[in-house]
Image (cartoon, grey):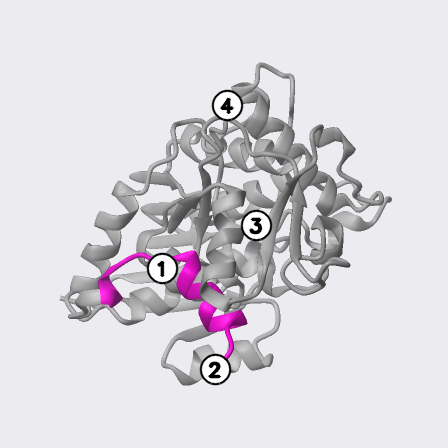
Amino acid sequence: MPSKLITVFGATGLQGSSVLASLAANSQKPFTLRGTTRNPSSAAAKKLSDSGIQVVKADGWDKQSLISAFHGSWAVFANTNSDDAVFENPDEKRTEVDLGKIIVDAAAEAGVEVIVYSGFNSANKITGGKIPVAAFDDKNEIWEYAKSIGKFKTVVAAGPGWYFENYLGQDLAPILGGFPFVPAEDGTLVFRAPKWGGKEDVPFISIGDDYGDIVHAVSDIKSFGQMTQAFENATGKKARFEEIPNWRDLEVYGIRGLETIKNMWGFCQESGGRYFGDETEAKTAAELKKLAAATRGATGKAAQLATLEDFWKANFGTE
């Protein structure tokens, strides 16, 4: 019996590459894997190709290229980038919803049975219209559209939490107190941000280690205070969390992507910390991680979710 083909839209992105890596390691039920990219000659695309994954060129705005890329696929995983450079153009009229619907329609026309979209619940709906978050609301509209057209056997939305990997980029650090790169005058690394809301149970996820295995929300759950304490424990470097009392006071300098982050805090505080619309929990993710590990014969630590402590030690610890 031929193996089922799974195509990942955006194969070289953090989410797409994690999904492909997990599927490629599945020895119990091997799949044929294909990844789409706008630039097959990129180093990331070549790395995928060298690993045995079929890489094809496709553009999310070009429906015919997507139909060709999805042809023969049993399932498609897709993530749309809310911060794509195209949306920074003030003259651009197309939206993320337009992009998502093109992808969904192309998958339907290609005969795809299962679509997994990196979507979200609607901040606007959850807060009764008080705190809309365009990126969340747009992704929710795409997910609802995929369900509404009745062309797929299964439609799944999988929204990740706060990436561990966000802390590896130095661009965001100055906006949030300098943590974990630039210390304050007293030498402490300060994470300065609004509180999360509710139980302060921030859903963190390691995209590289866990997302592909669980295609779910959470690797670790901690408050921002616990997060910075974990950093201090793992690295020996002094760190602390400082609260911005009013989330509206977070300065984002007119940057569209940062405005999304700012509104995210407002949404979480209004929803009682319920980032996904429901209470944050990691039990489901832990079970999914074990199941994924079993498909490649992994046990022990490799079958457990990543922790912030391990992430801090690996990336910011000293020998």
In the rendered view, does 249 fall on the left or right side of 14? Answer: right
Residue type indicated by callout 4: Gly
Tell me, for residue 272, which label it has, or none: 4
Q: Could you say where residue 48 lies in the image, as x and y percent from the top left?
A: 45, 77
Q: Are marks 4 and 3 in contact (CB under 8 Å)?
A: no
Quarter of the image where the N terminus is located: bottom left
Labels 4 and 3: the sequence-earlier one: 3
Q: Closer to the camera: disc 3 or disc 2?
A: 2
Q: Report the residue at 24% width, 66% height from top.
A: 301
Regarding mark 1 in the picture, which secondary structure is present there? loop
**CA separation, marks 3 and 1?**
25 Å
Q: Residue at x 51, y 62 (%)?
A: 14
Q: Is residue 73 above or below residue 132?
A: below
Q: Label 2 to label 1, Cα distance in Å?
A: 20 Å
Q: Is disc 4 placed on a helix, strand or loop?
A: loop
- Seen at 26% across and 59% down, the residue is 304
- Element class at badge 3: loop
In the rendered image, the vertical position of residue 246 relative to residue 185, given as above or below: above
> How far apart are labels 3 and 2 at the CA level?
38 Å
Q: Which residue is mark 3?
A: 80
**How dense is the environment of label 1, judged by Cα within 10 Å: few (below 14), some, or many (20 and up)?**
many
- Mark 4 and mark 1: span between their CA atoms? 25 Å
Q: Which mark is residue 306?
A: 1
Q: Which residue is mark 2?
A: 319
Identify the mark nearer the N-term, 2 or 1. Answer: 1
Check contact, mark 3 vs mark 2: CB within 8 A.
Answer: no
Residues in magenta, as a range: 301-319
Within 10 Å of the Cα at label 3, are there few (<14), some (14-19), or many (20+) other Cα atoms? many
Q: Earlier in the sequence, mark 2 or mark 4?
A: 4
Q: Mark 1 or mark 3, which is nearer the start of the sequence?
A: 3
